[in-house]
Image (spheres, grey):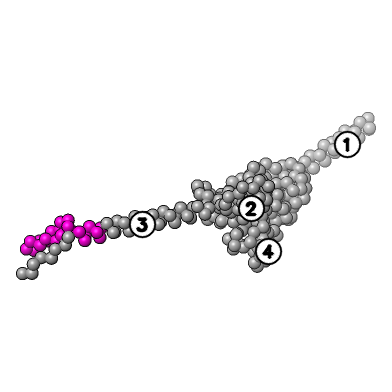
């Protein structure tokens, strides 16, 4: 009988203890669930390996108590993608599922992630070394768009390839509106759209000028379609390439004619022909004036064909 009472007493005490614990936990949760104490942070929705783009697909947002927000954690106000929805950041270190996204675990594309993350989808990166005069006096910047103009010596190119029979030097536009990915080791970095972290602010204070030095040659890296790369390499190795800078927002492609010596000879002949034609007209007009006759009747003067006769003085 006494054992039964002990069992009942233990059960009652256990139930009361569970109730007290539940009430305590509920009070704690209510305290932390107040709007003033919550903060939205970005967390990974899946495991994100290192050197992987941080996108809206693998990152989400949750609300946590402010005390639980880790230092350097990103919030929904921080922009991880640009207006076109393209990622601006990549993971430097692995990020576990459910882990808060910290500023020291991601990096702007092109700073520490390398050139590969700056290449547009479906394109390839290829470089060329140019002299200043052939690259807008070295004033090109990553993110600029250029036209690729090449001058090819057909005789030299044909003889070096073993075919022979080359005829003349021609200049032509091979590609238009080509994106520059890098100038020397300076990469495309969209700092304006970047997350405002302390580390990024420090980087913004650093000089972003080109490191190619003054004068001489320097290297430019551009983005091309796979089928364009072989053409680019051929003209790079066989011709004289010049990059022509485009104005911001100018993406229109023009019908640019091929130019050779005949182009200038033809233009000169056309100008010469126009001059001769104008000269013939002037001569014909002068001859017509010389062969006309002026007849004065009172105050009226009349010209007719023939020689010029002077009227008798009054």
* Residue 141 on image: x %, y %: 61, 58
Local SS, label 4: loop
Q: Which residue is mark 1?
A: 10
Of residues 252 and 230, the one drawn nearer to the viewer in this rendering: 230
In three-dimensional space, the C-alpha distance between marks 3 and 4, rounded to whole angstroms, equals 56 Å
- The mark nearer the N terminus, 1 or 3, is 1
Q: Nearer the viewer, mark 3 or mark 4?
A: 3
Q: Is residue 290 left or right of residue 270?
A: left
Q: Nearer the viewer, mark 4 or mark 2?
A: 2
Q: Nearer the viewer, mark 4 or mark 1?
A: 4
Q: Quadrant of the C terminus?
A: bottom left
| Marker disc for residue 276 | 3
In three-dimensional space, the C-alpha distance between marks 3 and 2, rounded to whole angstroms, equals 38 Å
Within-10-Å neighbours for mark 1: few <14, some 14–19, many 20+:
few
Residue occupying the point 76% across, 45% down: 49
Of residues 280 and 214, the one drawn nearer to the viewer in this rendering: 280
Residue occupying the point 46% across, 53% down: 266
CB contact under 8 Å: marks 3 and 2: no
- The mark nearer the N terminus, 3 or 4, is 4
Q: Which residue is mark 2?
A: 156
Of residues 66 and 313, the one drawn nearer to the viewer in this rendering: 313
- Kindly give the residue lying farthest to the bottom in the view shown: 314
Query: Within the magenta stretch, is there residue 246?
Result: no
In three-dimensional space, the C-alpha distance between marks 1 and 2, rounded to whole angstroms, equals 103 Å
| Marker disc for residue 211 | 4
- The mark nearer the N terminus, 3 or 2, is 2
In three-dimensional space, the C-alpha distance between marks 1 and 3, rounded to whole angstroms, equals 124 Å
CB contact under 8 Å: marks 3 and 4: no
The magenta stretch is 285-306
Q: Is residue 211 visible?
A: yes
């Amino acid at each position: 009988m006494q054992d039964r009472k002990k069992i009942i007493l233990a059960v009652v005490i256990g139930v009361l203890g569970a109730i007290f614990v539940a009430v305590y936990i509920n009070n704690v949760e209510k305290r932390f669930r107040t709007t003033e104490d919550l903060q939205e942070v970005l967390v990974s929705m899946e495991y994100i390996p290192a050197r992987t783009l941080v996108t809206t697909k693998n990152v989400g947002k949750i609300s946590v108590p402010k005390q639980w927000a880790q230092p350097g954690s990103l919030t929904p106000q921080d922009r991880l993608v640009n207006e076109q929805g393209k990622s601006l950041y990549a993971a430097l270190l692995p990020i576990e599922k459910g882990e808060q996204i910290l500023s020291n675990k991601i990096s702007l594309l092109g700073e520490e992630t390398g050139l590969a993350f700056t290449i547009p989808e479906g394109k390839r990166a290829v470089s060329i070394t140019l002299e200043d005069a052939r690259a807008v006096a070295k004033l090109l910047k990553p993110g600029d768009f250029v036209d690729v103009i090449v001058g090819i010596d057909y005789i030299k190119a044909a003889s070096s390839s073993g075919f022979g029979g080359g005829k003349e030097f021609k200049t032509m536009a091979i590609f238009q509106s080509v994106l520059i990915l890098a100038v020397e080791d300076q990469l495309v970095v969209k700092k304006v759209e970047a997350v405002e972290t302390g580390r990024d602010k420090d980087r913004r204070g650093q000089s972003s000028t080109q490191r190619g030095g003054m004068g001489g040659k320097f290297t430019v890296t551009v983005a091309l379609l796979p089928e364009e790369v072989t053409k680019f390499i051929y003209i790079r190795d066989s011709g004289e390439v010049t990059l022509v800078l485009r104005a911001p927002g100018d993406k229109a492609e023009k019908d640019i004619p091929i130019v050779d010596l005949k182009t200038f000879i033809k233009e000169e002949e056309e100008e010469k022909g126009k001059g001769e034609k104008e000269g013939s007209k002037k001569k014909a007009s002068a001859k017509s004036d010389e062969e006309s006759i002026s007849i004065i009747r009172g105050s009226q003067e009349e010209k007719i064909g023939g020689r010029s006769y002077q009227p008798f003085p009054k």
